[in-house]
Amino acid sequence: MVDRCMEFIKALGISCQYLAKAEISNDSLNDVLKMFGQSMNVSGVSLLRKRYRNSKSYLFEFVAQWSSFGDEIRSLPDPLISQNLPPDWIVSLNEQRPVVGKDTELFLLGATSNLLLVPVFCEEQFSFVLTFSDFQHCGVDGTMQELGMAAGNILGLWAKNIQTEMQHAEIMDFIPSPVLVLDSSGSVKAMNKAIEEVPGWSTEKTGKIKQTEINKKNTHSTVSTLAKDFADKGIFVPSKSGTIYDICDRPYGTIHYMEDVTREREIAKNLRRSETMYRTIIDFAGVGIILFRKDRILYYNERLAEFLGIAGRIITLADFMNWIDSSEPEVRKFFQKPSQKINNPTTFEFSTDDREEGLRHYQGYGRVIGYENRPAIHFILDDITEQKELAKIARMNELRLQHEDRLTALGVMAAGIAHELNQPLNTIRVISDTSLFGRDQGWELNEEEIFDGFEMISKQVLRMSDVIHSIRNFAREDRGKLDNIDPNDAIKNVFSMIGKQFEAHGIHIEMDLETYLLPIRGNLNALEQVIMNLVVNARQALEEHRQFNKKLWIKSGTRFNQFFIEVGDNACGIPHELRINVFDPFYTTKEPGKGTGLGLSISQSIVTEFKGTIKVYNNDQGGATFFITAPFSGDKS
């Protein structure tokens, strides 16, 4: 028995050397089982692995087997399901106790006389079963069980080593970047899948490195060489390298970690390209851009610096505030205490006084945006000085055109105006001639009759003065001054100038004006011009298309909280295909020399200044009706 124990101990020592190189299901493992079997004088040895099919069910899978019946290893049997083994066996094995089989139980594992099952634990988990079949010349006594447990412990260490290597391999494969392990000779000992997936990779690229380089901790030499070799496959940079030591603190090899920064470099390149393009766009956009938070400017572009006339230093919010004219309190307040709740864009117009260029006008758009996970004010400035100047010139031209149109209207109505002045002049002449004739004839003049004549002359002079005043006001060139006006005054002033002319042409005028209208915001002369254009057009249409029963009406009133003026006639109306163009500039249906085509276009622009509308339609009396609406000023005075 002592000799057998010594043989078994010798077998354990040799087995340890074999197991250091052994993997699951290879020849070295079979040789180990053979040494165990021969030293313990059994007919067969098997190693079964516990493999789980799910979280609860498992089976025992044969991984190696030796038999004394021949040198050839028999084919491994089919797996054994745990339910095929006696339950008390499973309990003992889980409790790290060997199991001795007898009688019919032996047939399951190929034994004929006796059987020893030894549990193999790996990191405190029941993982393998080592079986010894048919002990020769002796039974399975306590000594045999102890020897079997010793063999199981050796296999447990081997299993732990195998498991550690598998876990290390899985951890390395989990790392997305290439990892390489070299031994002291410079040969590849381990690498992960990431390096194997590099196009064109081969172990020959590593070459050999000197032992002195291995002794240097954190050396980058080898991995830098490899990174250059992969330059045509991507961009690899050495991230970290280190030396591996064995249990005796001797340098064993090196481990190198390379990082594939191809995508990062491409992203950085695209980011720089996008940033350059963005800066180019905003710098050449022609507008100033500023981003600020409370009392600090976060960003501004070159155009804003040009607006402020500051170069060579960083612009502060104080510089910006000093640049804005002091007469712009709302804008200054916006920048001094910006609201963090400006969800909709806020628009400003303000001016600055430039010493070199004079007064400049700007338009700004402000809004709260998210910047670095915090709200900030984004402000865009546009220099609108030229637009302001052009708008001013355009307005002057428009007013000049309106003035010329008024003079044209006066020319058209010259005969009516002359009639308005001739009638009171004739009355004055009759009174004065009668007085002179009576004196020559020696009439006795009655003092009361003389004063009655003077009173009549005074009334006629006042009438002429009113007509001349109305003409002067209508013809003068104003600058579009706005005031609260009564729409009825414009109507009355027009007909005080040309009302008699309509009567002279046999045109019956119906006037229905609502009293006590609320005032509207506008220019009285401009509204007079609109009414003048409409009634002159109506008079011309009536003269051309109607000989008898000529009628023109004008109304004023309130509708849907707005005032309205209606001017209509019973002439000929306007065909539909022409009606859509009547407000276009220079569009006219009159004969050459009788119209410029600007009257209705100017009238529409004037009504638009009143924030109103003007429309035209054919009425049920055969003529055309123009309908003007505009809001009241809100001033009930």
Image: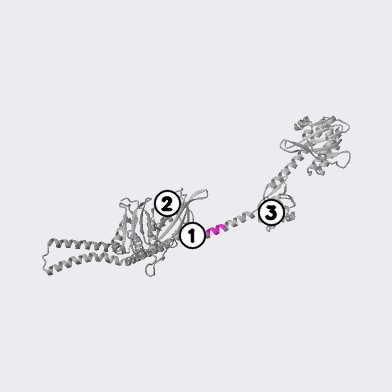
Q: Give the image location of residue 186, x and y in percent.
A: 74, 52
Q: CA distance from mark 2 to mark 3?
A: 59 Å
Question: Mark 1 or mark 3, which has the lower sequence index?
Answer: 3
- Picture quadrant where residue 156 is located: top right
Q: Nearer the viewer, residue 442 or 174?
A: 442
Residue found 81% across the figure and 32% down from its top? 145
- Disc 1 is placed on an element classified as helix
Residue found 12% across the figure and 62% down from its top? 447
Residue found 83% across the figure and 34% down from its top? 108
Task: Look at label 3 and name its amino acid.
Answer: Val
Q: Is residue 306 visible?
A: yes
What is the chief secondary structure element of the magenta stretch?
helix
Name the quarter where the N terminus is drawn: top right
Start and end of the magenta stretch? 274-279
Mark 1 vs 3: CB contact within 8 A: no
Mark 2 vs 3: CB contact within 8 A: no
Residue 357: give its label. Answer: none
Residue 334: give its label. Answer: 2
**Dot 1: within a 10 Å radius of its alpha carbon, few (fewer than 14), some, or many (20 or more) residues?**
some
- Disc 2 is placed on an element classified as helix
Residue found 83% across the figure and 35% down from its top? 109
Task: Look at label 2 and name its amino acid.
Answer: Phe
| Circle 1 residue | 302
- Picture quadrant where residue 142 is located: top right
Question: Mark 2 or mark 3, which has the lower sequence index?
Answer: 3
- Disc 3 is placed on an element classified as helix
| Circle 3 residue | 223
Q: Give the image location of residue 569, x and y in percent.
A: 36, 60
